[in-house]
Image (cartoon, helix red, strand yellow):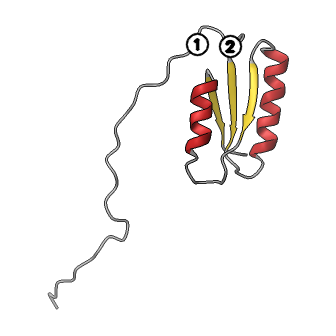
Amino acid sequence: MAEKIKVLDPRGYPPKVVGKRLANRPETLDGKVVYLIDCLFDNSDVFMEQLRDWFAQHIPGAITKMIKPRESWVDDPEMRARVVEDGDVAIIGVGL
């Protein structure tokens, strides 16, 4: 029984991945606006509040602002534009 079969891969073709450089780090966070982005994952709001408290204790000169996208897993151009326009640093929290 030398019958040939054809197998299709349901995963399709992976996208080409291009590496990017990391963002430049500021010398200090004192006086800088640090956006804490809650991505709406389970418990990420709890983690981001703890992170905000950590900044208050350890880097009180940093200005932390919490922000959330309109919905999870969907790009929010308005949120991104606000972070770029008003912020110096962004930390994305994806939950616990």
Q: Secondary structure at mark 1?
A: loop
Q: Quadrant of residue 73?
A: bottom right
> As displayed, is residue 87 above or below residue 4?
above
Q: Position of residue 44 (x, y in %)?
A: 74, 44
The percent coordinates of residue 10 (x first, y second) are 36, 71
| Res. 29 mark | 2
Q: Label 2: state its secondary structure.
A: loop
Q: Residues within 10 Å of mark 2 (few under 14, many from 20)?
A: some
Residue count near mark 1 (Cα–Cα under 10 Å), binned few <14, some 14–19, many ≥20: few
Residue 54 shown left or right of residue 96 in the figure = right
The residue under label 1 is which amino acid type?
A: Pro
Residue picked out by circle 1: 26
Residue at 62% over, 40% down:
79
Check whether the beta carbons of the residues at disc 2 and disc 1 lie within 8 A of each other.
yes
CA–CA distance in space, label 2 to label 1: 7 Å
Instruction: Say above or below: 93 vs 33.
Output: below
